[in-house]
Amino acid sequence: MSHPVTDTDAVAARYVDTIIIGSGFAGLGAAIKLSQQGNSNYLVLERGSDVGGTWRDNTYPGAACDVPSHLYSYSFALNPDWTRSFSRQPEIQRYIEKVAREHRVYDRHVFDCHVESARWNEATAQWDLETTQGAFTASKLVSAVGALSEPNLPDIPGITDFRGDIFHSAQWDHETSLRGKRVAVIGTGASAIQIVPAIAPEVAHLDVYQRTAPWVLPRLDREYTALERAAFKYVPGFQRLSRTGIYAARETQVVGLAKAPALMKVFEFIARRQIARGISDPELRRKVMPNFRIGCKRMLISNNYYPALSRPNVDLVTDGIAEVREHSIVTKDGTEREIDALVVATGFHVTDSPTFQGIFGRDGRSLAEVFDERGQQGYKGAAVAGFPNLFFLVGPNTGLGHTSMVFMIESQLNYVIDALNTMERHDLGVVEVRRDVQDRYNADLQQKLGKSVWLTGGCASWYLDKHGNNTTLWPDFTFEFRRITKQFDLEAYDAVAATDLAS
Ligand code: N01
């Protein structure tokens, strides 16, 4: 489907009040909120050629959401038409595009526009951006680049010498057929456990390289009946009620994850039963048994992963990878396995995202340098000291392992849009979060996180930064985050009036 073209006048001017980087659920939500209040003095710069972010990029076979559909949607754009309890990628992507069309924000987007750098200009109190489509300037910058957007390619000896087909799970090559080929998948995270059952029936042979066995719970996925779909559509309040029910059920997990990790043993019992039911070979059962407390890494859900591993054409390889050769993988025990194609499902750069290297704050230091020194710390996930007029969506400590990121994103939208409006209302030229406020906020967060399963569960995960702190997840109930982001708290910021800047 073709979308309305970008407002060329806005692009020609090269200046807007607010630039949003990225148009996934977060950036698109910001664009819609601004448009809804009649503000057209903004642009969204998006490196891809459509909205959708991670849902546009992750098109691998089997890609689907781990959060129920009716909760994994905007509260202002409920969708009675979801066909399944857990939506698949194409349906989510169609939903996001439909929301963008219906809210008429496509014409505020500049697609195929990769932001190479954003630099705070102290003299003009503006952000100067260099992009693949030239320079842009804005008074305020909203970073909505997503935490899972930069593929992490493993640094395995010899991997660049591989001569067969090779691609990352988030950059699936649909031109390449895997049918009848010998394939290897490296990784057993959320992406890999969806890919493995989807490709196993069509490949000649599949080697799954597991470094750490994940915990896998049942996936309660099914198609909605015609009656349910009619109820979602026509019975007033039914969809919201169902959404609230899913939300409440998911929130209870916070108690075990963050407050009393021992309670997570209940989930381990369910997961162990799933192993016993899905795998009959005792050796394979032993290999897939995790060695850490459930919840420490993201809990995975699947009904067909263990049956896929049990297929005669699939091997689970647990000896570490020593090297990749032109047509094979060699494990540390010296075994060489020949392959035609290699799928790298090794996750993303999260706490070390390359995008941090291109954002330069007040003293010319990049976000990467600041995060490297102090850890990935921010304030309410929306601001970082030293980076004036820069607001984050899905910033530090706003991720979740148990429920809908869309709920968190909407909380952040409340806060960031209110920040922009507050600046307008008070005629402020600059706001920057106070370092002492940010430090206190992070001390409190880390204290809460200290007893959580993410730190006590005995695993290494991408939730932790290089200082060993969990700087990705929100450690409390999500309604608590909704409460603290209800309004922009100007008192936590240093502010300069626009008139003082002019003089
Ligand atoms: O990535 P991951 P993912 N050699 O980082 C292994 C979201 N998501 O793309 O566990 C060998 O979780 C690594 O091993 P280990 C969701 O938030 C959501 O699967 O580190 N192996 C691990 O097994 C998820 O958490 C949905 O020991 C290497 C795997 O690769 C996030 O995306 C669906 C390695 C990476 O797992 C990321 O998931 C899919 C190496 N050098 C994804 N390096 C939803 O449904 C890494 N590994 C919403």
Image: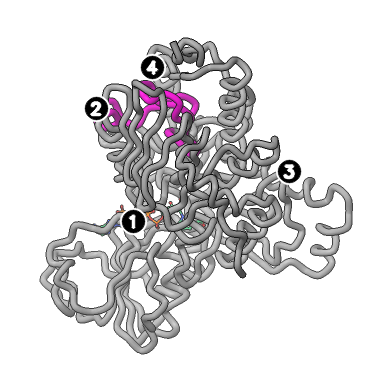
In the drawing, what numbered circle is on residue 373?
A: 2
Residue 340: image location, x then y, percent: 26, 82
Q: Amino acid at mark 1?
A: Pro
Report whether 191 appears left or right of 220: left
In the drawing, what numbered circle is on residue 244?
A: 3
Q: Label 3: how many residues lie within 10 Å, few (<14), some (14-19) or many (20+)?
A: some
* Residue that carries the numbered disc 4 in the rendered image: 439
Residue 153: image location, x then y, percent: 26, 58
Q: Nearer the viewer, residue 269 or 379?
A: 379
User: Could you tell me how far apart the alpha carbons at marks 4 and 3 are, in whole angstroms?
Assistant: 34 Å
User: Could you tell me how far apart the alpha carbons at marks 1 and 4 are, in whole angstroms?
Assistant: 30 Å
Residue 173: image location, x then y, percent: 38, 74
Q: Nearer the viewer, residue 487 or 6?
A: 6
Q: Amino acid at mark 4?
A: Asp
Check disc 4 and report its element: helix, strand or loop.
Answer: helix
Check disc 3 and report its element: helix, strand or loop.
Answer: helix
Q: Earlier in the sequence, mark 3 or mark 1?
A: 1
Q: Amino acid at mark 2?
A: Glu
* Residue that carries the numbered disc 1 in the rendered image: 151
Magenta stretch: residue 411 in it? no
Q: Residue furthest bottom?
A: 180
Q: Label 2: how many residues lie within 10 Å, few (<14), some (14-19) or many (20+)?
A: few
Question: Of discs 3 and 1, which sits in the foreground?
Answer: 1
Q: Is mark 4 within 8 Å of ligand 1?
A: no
Q: Earlier in the sequence, mark 1 or mark 2?
A: 1
